[in-house]
Amino acid sequence: MSIYQKLVRKHLLDLKPYSSARDEYSGKEGVFLDANENPFGSVSGKNLNRYPDPYQWEIKSKLAELKGCKAENIFLGNGSDEAIDLLIKSLCEPKEEQILILPPTYGMYQVCADIQQVEVLKSNLTADFQLDLEDIDAKVGEKTKMIWICSPNNPTGNLIDSDSIKTLLEKYKEIVFVIDEAYIDFTKQASFIGLLDRYENLVVIQTFSKAWGLAGLRVGMAFAHVDLIKILNKIKYPYNLNLQSQRLILEALDNVAQKETYVDLILQERENLKAGLLPLPIVEHIYPSDSNQLLVRFKAAKSIFQTLLENKVIVRDRTNVVLCDDCLRISIGTESENQRLLEALKEIAERMK
């Protein structure tokens, strides 16, 4: 028996999920008269008139080989945001239990918890954006069900020390740790997926939106103990990943080399952009990054952000985020996009002399 017999919300353990037509027959051949589909085709002219596999087993089989885990350990969702939402929904009783987040961090952890009326505890990262283990210990209580760690972190871009994460996993074996690895493809560090067999309380989230260049498809991944994956599959919408997305993800998984090429290009452009930013007098600090973003502290950051907007150069204003005073977050663009940003910043610097 896994820890999830105790940690999952009690009513969900015995929940009878909706059974779709494709639950009853998963084969690809036959006369399909079970799902009230249009038998003549799609008005789009594409082959989209049949419902997709609700559990995406073909994708999971390929992913399992790529990621070094079992297909039964994988959940696929409509973006990783669906996994975030369902994880909180499956484990946390509204108005009774808590999650712990580590600001500055990805905002959807807070939003999903707020929607479900789950209390959010906060332990700020240290000045160098690492875990404050003493403060986390002080914040964790009997009602704490989950701890969310984004690594590489958003918006700071840096990896969180893996030994510190392992220390927490060992110490709090009945708290679920979600390691959000949306940006892991931009690093050389091994994914925490390889530790799923060691830690029952570990969940890893990844995405096709960043390095894979498939943000428009909205496909995210969660890797976890099979008992938790079963619960996520119970409470998701029946056909949560559409047919076109499934087809394109399968094609992408046959072209890992192209993803790696994109990663190399982005990392090179990140270094070029950093080199271009360093001499600018309006730049006060560029934080180390292990991802496809740079967190940069500027003089008069809000004014610079607004001027960039007026010039149709869009970055992210993080000035109101804890520990990110006067900071803008810059996604790494193409060479020409980065050059346009640098030219705009040089003009701003000239006017601010």
Image (cartoon, helix red, strand yellow):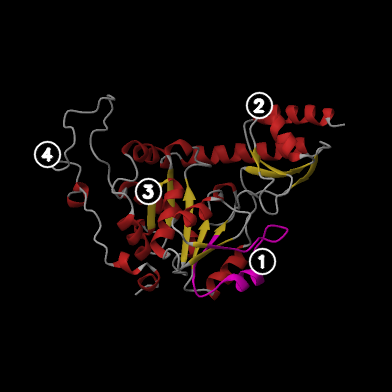
Between disc 4 and disc 3, the foreground one is: 4
- Residue occupying the point 31% across, 38% down: 243
* Disc 3/disc 2 C-alpha distance (Å): 35 Å
Instruction: Give 236 or 199, whichever is nearer the viewer.
Output: 236
On whether residue 267 falls in the magenta region, the answer is no
Are the residues tagged 3 and 2 within 8 Å (C-beta)?
no
Q: Earlier in the sequence, mark 3 or mark 2?
A: 3
Instruction: Give 52 or 112, whichever is nearer the viewer.
Output: 112
Q: Earlier in the sequence, mark 1 or mark 3?
A: 3
Q: Is residue 310 above or below residue 290?
A: above
Q: Is residue 40 above or below residue 75?
A: above
Q: Earlier in the sequence, mark 1 or mark 2?
A: 1
* Disc 1/disc 4 C-alpha distance (Å): 59 Å
Q: Is residue 116 above or below residue 306?
A: below
| Residue 214 visible in the displayed image | no
Q: Earlier in the sequence, mark 1 or mark 4?
A: 4
Q: What's the mark number on residue 31?
A: 4
Q: Which residues are magenta?
A: 120-148
* Disc 1/disc 2 C-alpha distance (Å): 39 Å
- Residue occupying the point 48% across, 38% down: 215
Q: Which residue type does callout 2 highlight?
A: Ser
Residue 190, given in percent of the width and then of the height, sits at 55, 57
Residue 179, given in percent of the width and then of the height, sits at 52, 59
Residue that label 1 marks:
132
Q: Which residue type does callout 1 highlight?
A: Asp
Between disc 1 and disc 2, the foreground one is: 1
Mark 2 crowd level (few <14, some 14–19, many ≥20, 10 Å Cα): few
Q: Secondary structure at mark 4?
A: loop
Q: Is residue 54 above or below residue 125?
A: above
Between disc 3 and disc 2, the foreground one is: 2
